Amino acid sequence: MMEKDFNLDDFGIYDGISETIVTTNKGWTPNAAPMGIIRKKDKLFIRLFKGSNTYENVLAEKKLVVNITHDPILFVLATFTDLNDSDFDTKAFDGISISSLKEAQCWIAFKCVNSKLTNEAFISELVPIRAHLNKCKIRAPNRGFCGVIEACIHATRYQLTEDEKYLKLIKAYGDIVEKCGGEAEKEAMKLIYEFL
Ligand SMILES: Cc1cc2nc3c(=O)[nH]c(=O)nc-3n(C[C@H](O)[C@H](O)[C@H](O)COP(=O)(O)O)c2cc1C
């Protein structure tokens, strides 16, 4: 529908892996979880490991919404909890329900094409079907925000493996958050320690 004139740069998705919050639906019930979106030239891919709600939902509906946000607390809550229904905006387009995050600076809905299923994961190319720009905020890079993202990733690995090395890494990133983060990043880090 919008594939030809769609420019990924305009929606903040650049080469490499972008950390986003992916929203999906099980019927009308929305779900949110942090997921990396992989861009190689002008193609996008996602790798969803088996076992998450996102994996189940995308496997069933072959569509997902990528939300761009710099809200560190939202990243932590989406990793460890179910967000409130009031955090989502759900609309139907061409008979398909699309849930995005109200807080997102922008969102892009994708259909999954050329998908493949391995023993561990669902890997798919993503083709844009609809997008929305909410607000454009310029933000300088903040090591505290990056620290929260890294700590979240190590926290999910710790939950899977209970390997103590991840606790050390979380503590190291926590120290950076303490030094460089703002109030929101510090609060997000506090939540990570509580969820562990
Ligand atoms: C920054 C970040 C990026 C992540 N990227 C991925 C990813 O690309 N693929 C994946 O399967 N899980 C990824 N995860 C882990 C999921 O977010 C995590 O398993 C989550 O709890 C799944 O939630 P759900 O069951 O509601 O889908 C990532 C986690 C974080 C914090």
Image (tube, rainbow, N blue to C red):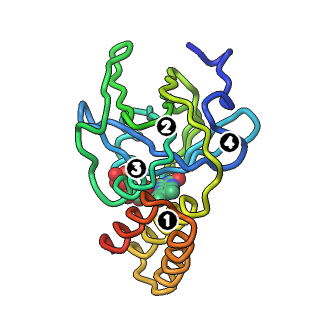
> Which residue is depicted at the point 38% across and 32% down?
100
User: Pointer 1: residues within 10 angstroms few (<14), some, or many (20+)?
Assistant: some
Amino acid type for the residue under numbered disc 2 = Val
Residues at discs 2 and 1 in contact (Cβ within 8 Å):
no
Ligand 1 in which quarter:
bottom left
Residue closest to the far bottom: 164
Amino acid type for the residue under numbered disc 1 = Ile
The percent position of residue 31, horizontal first and vertical second, equals 32, 43
The numbered disc on residue 153 is 1
Quarter where residue 39 is shown: top right
Spatial CA span between label 2 and label 4? 13 Å
The percent position of residue 177, horizontal first and vertical second, equals 52, 69
Spatial CA span between label 3 and label 1? 12 Å
- The residue at which mark 2 appears reads as 66
Give SS at disc 2.
strand
Relative side of 152 to 25, left or right: right
In the depicted structure, whether residue 111 falls above or below residue 37:
above
| Residue toward you, 177 or 54 | 177
Q: Is mark 3 within 8 Å of ligand 1?
A: yes
User: Pointer 2: residues within 10 angstroms few (<14), some, or many (20+)?
Assistant: many
The percent position of residue 107, horizontal first and vertical second, equals 49, 31
For marks 3 and 1 on the same chain, the one whose residue lies earlier in the sequence: 3
The percent position of residue 163, horizontal first and vertical second, equals 45, 84
> Which residue is depicted at the point 51% across and 84% down?
168
- The residue at which mark 3 appears reads as 33
Amino acid type for the residue under numbered disc 3 = Ala
